[in-house]
Image (cartoon, rainbow, N blue to C red):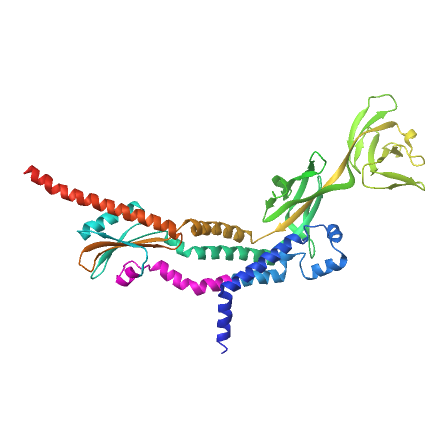
Amino acid sequence: MAASVPRKIWQTLGAIKTGVILLILVVILSAAGTVILQRPATDADEMQRAYSPQVLRVLDALRLTDVFHSWWFVLLLSLVSLSIIAASVQRFPNAWRFFSRPCKSPDESFRNALPLHKLIPVKDEEAALSVADRVLKKAAFHPERIVRENSFSLFGERNRISELAVYIVHTSLLLILLGGNIDALFGWRGFLTLTRGEQSSQVKPQNGSARNLPFAVRCDGAGQENYADGSPKRWWSDLAVLKNGKVVLRKQIVVNEPLVYGGVRFYQASYGKTGKLDRLTLTATPRDGQSAKDLTIGLDETLPLDADTTLRLAEFIPDYVVSDGHVYARSNELENPAAHLVLESKKSGQSINVWLPPIPGLEQNESSPYTFEGKDVQMAYFTGLEVSHEPGQWAVWAGVLVMGFGLVVVFYLVHMRIWIAPVRDARGQLQLWIGGTANKNKDAFEHRFRELVEKIESELKISVEAGAEAPAAVLAGK
C-alpha cells in the first residue's frame, strides 16, 4: 500500500491533465506579474500612488509585487518541470522503441491491417522491386531491402525524427523553466540613478543591502525626445563601463535595448529633472573697462577671473523666494532662478557675495570688480536604470532555440513510411503490394502516396514495354 502512494503521485504528475492545469496556473500568475506593478522596476512613490497602504501591504506579503522571484513561483515552475519529466519518462520507452526499431517487414496481418495500400499486377518480382526501389530513391525515401527467410521486401521512410518531436519540445520547456528557476533563486534586480558625469559601482536592490559591482557605470549623457504635442517619445542614456579606471565599453541605451556587461543588464527605466544646476553660462565684465569674458561654471566649481580674483558658484536656486532675509527654493522648476556667486581675492583674502539678480540685504554687487550677466542655464537631469543579473538566461535562450527546432519538426516534418512487397493473390497471380502511413497530415500523405503508386505503375509499364521491344529488335536483326 505504501509503495503504491509514490506510484500514484508519479502517475498523477505525468498525467496530461496535471500538466495543463499547472501551465494554466503559470500563465495566470505570469499575467498577474505583468498587471501588478513590480519592484524594483516601479518607483516606490509610484507604488504608493497606485495602491492604498492596506492593498500594498497585502500585495507585498503575498509577494505579488515580485512575482518572478517569489518562493511559490519557483515551486510552481519546479512542479511543471517534474510534470514534464514524469510524462516524458512514462511515455518515452514506447516512443523510443518505435523510433529505434521500426517495423520494416510487412507480414500478412500487417498488410491486412494497413488501410492505405495498393496492389499492382506484375510479372517479375525482382524487376518490379528494382523499379520501386528507383522510384523511392528519387522521392528521398531512402529504400532498404529487407530479406527474410521466406520473403523479401522494400522499406522506405522520411523524417523519422518527427516521432520524437514532442520530446524535443519537452526538453526546450525544461531548459526555459530551469533558466527561470535559476534567475528566481540566484538572480536579482535593482535600481541605479545617475546624473551626467556621475558614476557608481553600487546598485540598490529591491530587498537587502546595496550590491557592489566589480565595475563602475558612468553616465556621459541623457535626454528625452518628445512628440509634437510634447509627450515623451523616448529616453536615452550614453553609458560607459569602467574597470580599473579604464573605459571598457560604451553604449547608448534606450528602452528594450540594454547595456550588458559581466552578466549584468542595464535597462533605461526613467528620466527626469533633479532640480539642480548642471551648468551656468554667464558674462563677466571688468569695471576697469577691460574686455568681457564668457564663462561656463558648475555648482561649487571655482574659475580664475584674473591673476588675483577667482569666482565660485556657491548656490543656485531654480525658483527662489525671499522671506525674513533668507532665500528659499519654492520649487524645482526653472521659474525664477537666482545664482549666488562668491569672488575671492588672493591678496586681501576678501570675499564678495554677488547675487544674480541682486537681492537686497544679501548682495554685495557694487563692491565687486566685475559685473555679471546670466546667459544660459542648463539644469541637471537624472537617468533611472533598472539593473538585473539573470544567470539563467543562457538556459532560457537555449530552450528558445531548441523549441524553435522542435516546432519546425512538429509542424513541418511528417514521418512517412512506405512498404513494398511482392505477394500472390487467391488465384496465385503475382502482385506488388504497396502500403504507406504517416503520423500526421493524413490527407496530404494520401495524395503523395497516390502519386508514388502512379509513378511506380508508370515505370513498370515502361519497363515492360522496353522488355517486349528488346526480343522484337533481336528477331529483326536476325
Residue 91 included in the magenta stretch of the image: yes
In this picture, residue 478 sits left or right of residue 239:
left
Q: Position of residue 309 (x, y in %)?
A: 84, 30
How far from the left and from the top, in percent, is residue 368?
A: 89, 29
- Direction from residue 305 to residue 156 in the image, left or right: left
Q: Position of residue 210 (x, y in %)?
A: 69, 53
Q: Residue at x 60, y 60 (%)?
A: 73
Q: Quadrant of residue 222?
A: top right
Locate the C terminus and report the quarter of the image it occupies.
top left
Left or right: residue 191 versus residue 402 is right
Q: Furthest-front residue in view?
A: 427
The residue that appears at 84% across and 25% down in the rendered structure is 285
Q: Nearer the viewer, residue 343 or 414?
A: 414
- Image quadrant assignment for residue 298: top right
The chief SS type of the magenta part is helix
Left or right: 211 in relation to 442: right
Q: Is residue 396 visible?
A: yes
In magenta, the rendered stretch is: 83-112
Q: How many marks?
A: 0
Q: Position of residue 135 (x, y in %)?
A: 27, 46
In magenta segment, residue 92:
yes
Give the residue at the far bottom of this rendering.
1
Along the line of sight, which residue is nearer the eye, 473 or 254?
473
Displayed quadrant of residue 104: bottom left
Q: Residue at x 53, y 55 (%)?
A: 176
Image point (14%, 41%), residue name: 469
Q: Is residue 136 visible?
A: no
